[in-house]
Image (tube, helix red, strand yellow):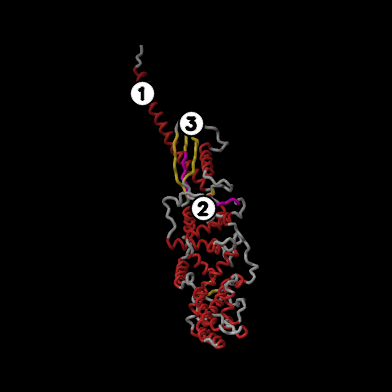
Amino acid sequence: MKKGYLTVYLSLSLSLILSFILTFIEGARISVIRMEAECVADIGMNSVLAEFHRELLEQYDLLFVDMSYGTRSYRAENPAEHLRAYMQGNFIGSDKNIRPRKDWLALSVDKAAVKELSIASDEGGNVMKRQAVEYMRQASVEGLLAGIIGQAKEVQDLELDTRDIDGERDNIQSQINAAYWPSKEGKEESEEEVLDNPADKINEFRGSFALHKVLGNGSYISGTVIQAEDYVSHREKITGIGIRPGLPAPKGLTDDLLFDCYLFDKCGWYGNELEKSFMKYQIEYIIAGKNSDKENLGSIVKRLIRWREVANVVYIFSDTAKCAEAETLAYTLAAVLQIPALAEPVKYSILFAWAYVESLTDVKCLLNGGKIPLMKTADDWKTSIWNIISFSGNVPDRESAGHGLDYQDYLRIMLYLEKSQIKNMRAMDIMEMDIRMTKGNSNFRIDACFDSYLSDIWISSIFGYCCNIQKRYGYD
């Protein structure tokens, strides 16, 4: 008989070795499952970000994913379904020419959720602004930024927006009334003499539509009108978590100025209208926020007239020659009525009227492509006192050349002085208007666009394993 010690020993050894091998294989399978799940999650999440909105990138150089995908369904479940489909396709494979093989992992996506979206309109539009500022950091605009800061400071120092020029003029008129009207008491109506002050005629035109004064009948002005409630600045918005954690928020003077430069790079304005744009005077809309191109341009023109009037009043009161001309005319009018007390207030009323007519001429020059300095010298002044005497409502033409600031420069100053959040929201209105004009984007909403998101994914295997993956992806 042969003894079986070796067989028993080998059997015991093989069972131990086989257990070790199978344990090693199972451990390797678990590790590979985790690795493949991570890799496929990366691929799927990048694939969702690869579905960025093409028109938004082409027109505004912004990278955002539209969660509606051109529909009216503005839900986070839409990109979540895309994420699940991308991952499932990578797990299963789609090449039918490959011979069937054993799948040692057999993974599938049980559920995929998209959470914590950074929506473009979050934080008053700062999510969108962050991308715009990063885009503009590549541009060489240092000299332009310094110039805008200096010009805006001069506007504030001159109080072009805040000086109560109307109150000053009304005070002068009340002095004229106090000196003139009491003198008429006791006279017959036929004996009354009229103060033929040319400033009175000019003041009558102040209430008329300013745009018509400087542009005539305005037949070539854009007639575009919008319904404000259709756009993001006026409707209830979809909200997210704000700027992606870890990324800096746009803040400070430099970022504000870079965003202003971005708006001038992407938007049109009077004299520089864009063919792609819905509203033709887009910068004017961002500043004024009215519901039509005509109203926006009219609002800018009125503000320009005010700025120029304040600056011209400051100058003309310092010009001794022009003050002497106004004084001579005022004393002549006072002498006719034999009311010496009228001379001084009439003089100042003439100077205010003269500054106003000069301002209308300035704005007309700006709209025709000319330049006007913020503060004038004697050489820059174009109207004469005879323009005041003969004024009939028509603004005299002047050459469009010159030195100083052009219409775009004045718009830049106004834009700089506007509040940051207002600019953000109105800029997104403009984006919605323009994108909706393109094919397949009639339902576009900027508050349905995100640039980063957190995914929560549940993956399982038919071999009984499952795992949960959470990742945050976005455009840097």
Look at label 1 and name its amino acid.
Ser
Which secondary structure, mark 1? helix
Q: Position of residue 42 (x, y in %)?
A: 47, 43
Secondary element under disc 3, as helix, strand or loop, is: loop
Of the numbered discs 3 and 1, the one sitting upstream in the chain is 1
Q: State the residue in front, 208 or 467.
A: 208
**Which residue is farthest front?**
186
For the residues marked 3 and 2, what is the alpha-carbon distance in whole angstroms?
38 Å
The residue lying toward the viewer, choosing from 287 and 228, is: 228
- Of the 4 image quadrants, the one containing the N terminus is top left
How many numbered discs, if any? 3
Q: Is residue 112 above or below residue 343?
A: above
Q: Is residue 4 left or right of residue 451?
A: left
Q: Observer-nearest residue: 77 or 99?
A: 77
Residue marked by disc 2: 63
Marks 3/1: CA distance?
A: 31 Å
Confirm whether the magenta stretch covers residue 12.
no
- The nearer-to-camera label among 3 and 2 is 2
Residue topped by disc 3: 462
N-terminal-most mark, 3 or 2: 2
Q: Is residue 475 above or below residue 417?
A: above
CB atoms of marks 3 and 2 within 8 Å: no
Q: Position of residue 244 (x, y in %)?
A: 44, 50
Tell whether label 1 touches label 2 (CB within 8 Å): no
Q: Are marks 3 and 1 in contact (CB under 8 Å)?
A: no
User: Looking at numbered disc 3 in the image, what kind of residue is underneath it?
Assistant: Ile
- Badge number at residue 13: 1
Residue 258 left/right relative to 389:
left
Q: Of the residues under marks 2 and 1, which one precedes in the sequence?
A: 1
